[in-house]
């Protein structure tokens, strides 16, 4: 098993919950779409000052952790840095609900 698998077992977290929480955390919302539109207008050169400010904000990716990615992480295979960050964000969200301390990415992988 991997460090992630051991941690999930020790913390009594079901991997399916990680998938569900990741989908909820990464889901695009209307303000995220507004940021993406503003970014397109800024790169196109037709942006106002308000759109430039909107484009500078952070937004969600809209790409949750998938089952194959989580399976690879649980086996200990190599996964991308972004996937590791998404898994860590979902695990931290679950730990927050259980009133436990947050973990860092390097503690899970």
Image: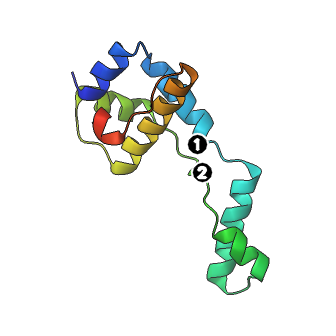
Residue 107 % position (x, y): 29, 35
Please say if 66 is above or below 6. below
x 64%, y 64%: residue: 57
Q: Which image quadrant is residue 13 in?
A: top left
Q: CA distance from mark 2 to mark 1?
A: 6 Å
Residue 35 left/right relative to 22: right
Binning the other alpha carbons within 10 Å of mark 1 as few (below 14), some (14 to 19) or many (20 upward) gives: some
Secondary structure of the residue carrying numbered label 1: helix
**Residue under numbered circle 2:** 60
Please say if 98 is above or below 23. above
Binning the other alpha carbons within 10 Å of mark 2 as few (below 14), some (14 to 19) or many (20 upward) gives: some
Residue 3 % position (x, y): 25, 27
x 75%, y 75%: residue: 51
Secondary structure of the residue carrying numbered label 2: loop
Residue 20 % position (x, y): 56, 26
N-terminal of the pair, mark 2 or mark 1, is: 1
x 37%, y 31%: residue: 70
Please say if 14 is above or below 59. above
Residue 106 % position (x, y): 29, 41
**Residue under numbered circle 1:** 26
Q: Are marks 2 and 1 in contact (CB under 8 Å)?
A: yes
x 46%, y 30%: residue: 91
């Amino acid at each position: 098993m991997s460090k992630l698998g051991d941690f999930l077992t020790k913390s009594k977290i079901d991997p399916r919950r990680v998938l569900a929480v990741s989908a909820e955390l990464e889901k695009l919302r209307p303000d995220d779409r507004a940021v993406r539109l503003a970014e397109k207008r800024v790169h196109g050169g037709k942006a106002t000052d308000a759109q430039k400010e909107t484009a500078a904000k952070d937004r969600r990716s809209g790409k949750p952790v998938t089952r194959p990615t989580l399976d690879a992480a649980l086996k200990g295979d190599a996964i991308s840095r972004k996937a590791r960050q998404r898994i860590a964000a979902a695990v931290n969200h679950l730990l927050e609900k259980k009133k436990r301390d947050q973990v860092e990415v390097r503690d899970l992988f």
